[in-house]
Image (cartoon, helix red, strand yellow):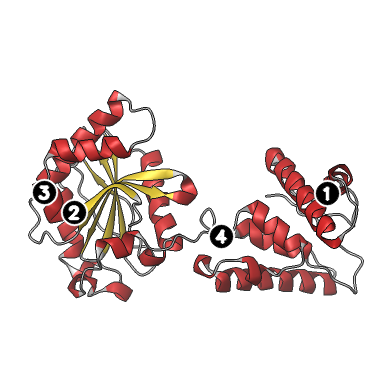
């Protein structure tokens, strides 16, 4: 079974496991140098969650420690999956306040799961920041349109009441997901092992687009192919309208990291318009990314030339790619 977390068990099993056993499981799964601060943080988290989850009226659900967020290369401190609601808990042990950076961090985790983890698309997600030395805070559950809640603030002593305020009162849920608490709890393994599908990397996207693929052909369906295709089409329509009427236009594309903003821009810049001498230039101030892209595209050029039986050394291909952005007929593929 795929293990996305250092520790994952039902709430009932978590409550009966000894703290020493749980700590041992976390330590064994941690493949990096283990600092005393991390061990002490785990001890605090285990003790506090045992105390709080033991107070829940209904103890159905699951507990995860150090759940991986692959695209971000990070792990959520703890997740409680109860009544089909996902509670993401980020601990700041010893902190006296829940600062903006911590709130942004846990909200980023929530958005990442909502958009890219296939078994989280239709679930309400509640991010919580726990500053263990903070004063109590009165929270109001506020939902965004995508069924992700605004981060709740806690010192850890009110986690049980926060969880029950969401799972026990359907009126506090977004309209589209009211009644989730009455639906059967999905098996822990099924949720945890759901596919994780962010959009392709910028290098993968650049290589595919410069080979003539369309954005809908290289975007993964679970990352929102429909929305990405509509975005690219809308941008192209603005370009065509501005060209036809000799006007200027500026468009802003927003979205969470990995949603495909750069991919949409690459798609526009690589579309050829046979009845026009104008060409797109895709610019960026991210120098290291430009260097990586040029190298990747050069290698790709050489590999495809070799498959065709043509002769092309890496140097000539690299020079060709490096010329992107010089002159109207060249494109600089960047972020």
Q: Which residue is mark 1?
A: 321
Q: Which residue is mark 2?
A: 162
Q: Nearer the viewer, mark 4 or mark 3?
A: 3
Q: Which residue is mark 4?
A: 199
| Residue 129, position as x, y percentages in the image | 29, 44
Residue at the image position 73 percent from the left and 64 percent from the top = 268
Residue at the image position 8 percent from the left and 50 percent from the top = 54
Disc 4 versus disc 1: distance between alpha carbons? 24 Å
Disc 3 versus disc 1: distance between alpha carbons? 58 Å
114 or 191: which is nearer to us? Answer: 191
| Residue 291, position as x, y percentages in the image | 74, 41
Q: Quadrant of residue 238?
A: bottom right
Disc 4 versus disc 3: distance between alpha carbons? 38 Å
> In this view of the protein, can residue 260 be seen by the observer?
yes
Q: Earlier in the sequence, mark 3 or mark 1?
A: 3
Q: Earlier in the sequence, mark 4 or mark 3?
A: 3
Disc 1 versus disc 2: distance between alpha carbons? 54 Å
Q: Which residue is mark 3?
A: 15
| Residue 23, position as x, y percentages in the image | 21, 36
């Amino acid at each position: 079974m795929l293990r996305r977390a250092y520790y994952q068990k039902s709430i009932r099993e978590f409550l009966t496991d000894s703290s020493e056993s749980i700590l041992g499981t976390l330590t064994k799964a941690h493949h990096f140098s283990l600092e005393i601060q991390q061990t002490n943080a785990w001890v605090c988290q285990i003790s506090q969650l045992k105390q709080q989850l033991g107070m829940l009226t209904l103890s159905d659900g699951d507990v995860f420690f150090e759940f991986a967020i692959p695209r971000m290369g990070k792990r959520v401190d703890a997740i409680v999956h109860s009544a089909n609601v996902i509670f993401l808990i980020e601990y700041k042990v010893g902190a006296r306040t829940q600062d903006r950076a911590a709130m942004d961090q846990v909200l980023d985790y929530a958005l990442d799961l909502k958009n890219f983890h296939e078994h989280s698309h239709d679930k309400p997600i509640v991010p919580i920041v726990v500053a263990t030395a903070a004063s109590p805070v009165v929270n109001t559950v506020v939902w965004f349109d995508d069924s992700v809640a605004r981060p709740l603030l806690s010192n850890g002593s009110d986690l049980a009441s926060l969880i029950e305020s969401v799972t026990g009162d359907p009126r506090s849920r977004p309209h589209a997901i009211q009644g989730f608490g009455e639906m059967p709890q999905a098996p822990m393994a099924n949720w945890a092992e759901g596919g994780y599908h962010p959009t392709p990397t910028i290098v993968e996207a650049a290589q595919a687009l410069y080979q003539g693929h369309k954005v809908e052909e290289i975007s993964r369906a679970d990352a929102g192919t429909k929305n990405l295709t509509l975005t690219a089409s809308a941008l192209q329509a603005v370009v065509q309208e501005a060209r036809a009427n000799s006007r200027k236009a500026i468009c802003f594309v927003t979205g969470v990291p990995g949603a495909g903003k750069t991919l949409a821009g690459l798609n526009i810049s690589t579309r050829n318009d046979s009845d026009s001498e104008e060409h797109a230039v895709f610019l960026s101030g991210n120098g290291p990314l430009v260097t990586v892209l040029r190298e990747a595209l050069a290698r790709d050029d050489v590999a495809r030339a070799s498959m065709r039986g043509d002769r092309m050394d890496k140097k000539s291909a690299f020079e060709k790619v490096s010329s992107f952005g010089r002159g109207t007929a060249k494109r600089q593929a960047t972020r």
